[in-house]
Amino acid sequence: MESALDEGYTVHCLVRNPEKIRRAHARIRVFTGSPCQTSDLQKAMQGCEAILSVLNVSRTSDFPWARLRTPHTFLSTVMRKVVQQAQKQNIQRVVVCSAWGVADTKQDIPWWFRALIRYSNIGTAYADHERQEKILRESGLSWTVVRPVGLTNSKKREHIIESYGNTPRPRLTIARKSVARFMVKSIGEDRLIGRSPVLSGKPYA
């Protein structure tokens, strides 16, 4: 949200708990609801020029085997509704956050992480990321799927490494703020339409 405001955008936020939006700003419109509800999506998307989604299948804790807090098809269910509303409201641009290790990047991640995805509940999110990516690819919309590596809360600015086909080889981490900045910048970059860059970060020297 901060990155979008910095770029001069007016931001529509659909949230379950509006108290989590701690910053008051003239260009923030907060909508209370669930992305699983078509009527809530319709209201939040009204008048928008682009959609950014950073949803994920969540667990009750960071423990890989913790039980799921959201349905295992949460992402794909919401994406179907987002695509339907985007088509109805003539919103063409969609930028979605997925993950490194999804779909064709599965063999690019370290072996130990592939094992963790396969044998823990982390894999549930990766499977649904793959489903939502497929829905988006087949939507006819102008989409970009970003696949970040391991996310950190670092506040340091960093160079963003954009990789395709494992080239250049991604580093293992990137700051959430860097991913947010890249996603917002992607809205106006035609070169990223229909592409799925893997994002990693390199701290400034």
Image (cartoon, grey):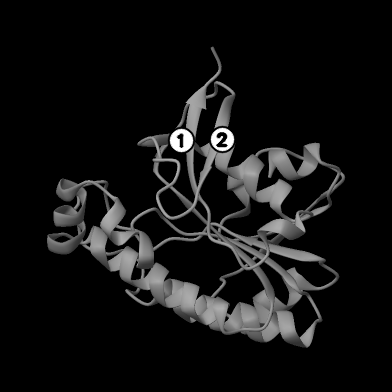
Q: Nearer the viewer, residue 41 or 92?
A: 92
Image vertical order of residue 153 relative to residue 111, above or below: above
Q: Label 1 amino acid?
A: Ile
Q: Is residue 195 left or right of 169 when viewed as pictured?
A: right
Image vertical order of residue 17 relative to residue 141, above or below: above
Q: Earlier in the sequence, mark 1 or mark 2?
A: 2
Q: Are marks 1 and 2 in contact (CB under 8 Å)?
A: yes
Q: Quadrant of the C terminus?
A: top right
Q: Label 2 amino acid?
A: Ile
Is residue 135 at all visible to an observer of this figure?
A: yes
Give the image location of residue 175, x and y in percent. Answer: 49, 33
Give the image location of residue 148, x and y in percent. Answer: 46, 47
Q: Quadrant of residue 162?
A: top right
* Nearer the camera: disc 1 or disc 2: 2
User: Residue placed farthest to the top in the image?
Assistant: 205
Q: CA distance from mark 1 to mark 2?
A: 8 Å
Residue name at image x 37 percent, y 72 percent: 128
Please, what secondary structure does the residue beneath circle 2 have? strand
Q: Nearer the viewer, residue 181 or 15?
A: 181
Give the image location of residue 113, x and y in percent. Answer: 21, 49
Q: Quadrant of residue 43?
A: bottom right
Total marks shown come to: 2
Give the image location of residue 35, x and y in percent. Answer: 57, 72
Q: Which residue is mark 2?
A: 160
Q: Which residue is mark 1?
A: 174
Is residue 65 at all visible to an observer of this figure?
A: no
Q: Quadrant of the N terminus?
A: top right
Residue name at image x 82 percent, y 66 percent: 49
Residue name at image x 39 percent, y 40 percent: 169
